[in-house]
Image: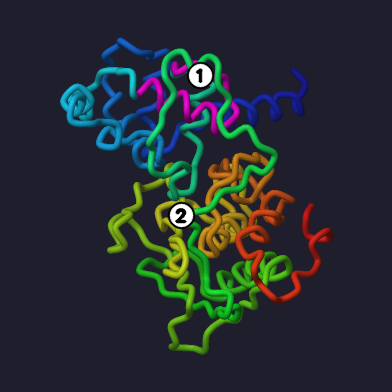
Amino acid sequence: MPPNLFLLLGAFLLLVTIPPGKAFKFLQHLEGSHKGKTVEGLGELKRYLEKFGYLNYGAQHDSKTKFSNHIHVNDEEFDELLESAVGAYQSNYHLNITGILDSETIQHMMLPRCGVPDVVNVTNSLSSTQIKQTKLFNMVAMYSFFPGRPRWPLSKTYLTYSFQSSAQVVGLQELRLVCSRAFRKWQNVSPFTFVEAPQGAVGDIVIGFHRGNHNDGAPFDGPGGVFAHSFAPTKGWFHYDADEDWSSNPNMSQIDLESVAVHEIGHVLGLGHSRDRNAIMYASLPTGTIKRNLSTDDIQGIRALYSGSTRKISYYFQCSA
């Protein structure tokens, strides 16, 4: 075998054999699971789907059915509500809607992702029949908002940001440069001006690295799972998971600081996740990926949310690529 070909083959094998992150590793043993099966790990899958907004046993009952719905909350049985939640997940990510944990679905679920839920307030889930017949959210615009559509007051378009971490991961100067570029992307297409707060002051938006339970009600899960999360306006919190491998010039096993910063700032401004794979606000980001430019869907979303603003929004077409 020619030396160059050997090196290329070795690099390929290294990439395809990288083990999944610890946080979502349980998913790889669930491939092929479907309604009626009892498999160890399905309880963790239920918690995964509940965390990201697809499953809520408590919201699915009335006085006549609450016992039948709650009986499977913590067990390892693949019940009808779990099938429905898997189907909803598949629909949201443009996967084949089967309600079965096929290989494609498992691989997507294992991708590193943002901790903000995709779907909120589950009131309607797909029935077994609908799973095979329905495509959810059949619309051109794929952006979304938080429940109740919270946003910053239209009178408050000047937002400051500051840094406060409980774990040291990257140097402050590097983080400042990364976030400055990320804020500029949104400033160019929104009514906002973003300025770093004076030293020692707490900004409207507070950015930092934290690990595990960091007293915001949303503990991180360690490497290979949720890489960051933010909160809806006007809380202004944006947290990186310090247990991930971060870089501003990532290799294939690292997560890009700036790509995640642009995404999380979108949440801080009030955008939810997008179903558009090309959008900054798409929930998952594979390691090694650099994705720093706003898509048309991102820009349309922020414009729709702040359509009542009187400030002119410039550079719409230049920044849409």
Instruction: Give the magenta range.
Output: 82-100
Q: Is residue 259 magenta?
A: no
| For residue 73, side relative to residue 130 (left or right) | left
Q: Position of residue 60 (x, y in %)?
A: 30, 31
Task: Please give the count of numbered marks on the rendered protein.
Answer: 2
Residue at 64%, 68% (x, y): give it: 308
Real-space Cα separation, disc 1 to disc 2, in angstroms: 26 Å
Secondary structure beneath dot 1 equals: helix
Which residue is label 2 attached to? 228
Q: Residue at x 33, y 54 (%)?
A: 218
Q: Residues within 10 Å of mark 2 (few under 14, many from 20)?
A: many
Task: Indicate which disc residue 103 carries.
Answer: 1
Q: Which of the pair 78/139 is nearer the observer?
A: 139
- Work out whether residue 272 or residue 312 is closer to the camera in this orientation and state it: 312
Residue at point 30%, 18% (across, down): 79
Q: Is residue 37 above or below residue 287?
A: above
Indicate yes or no whether the magenta region holds residue 87: yes
Question: Residue at the right extreme?
Answer: 318
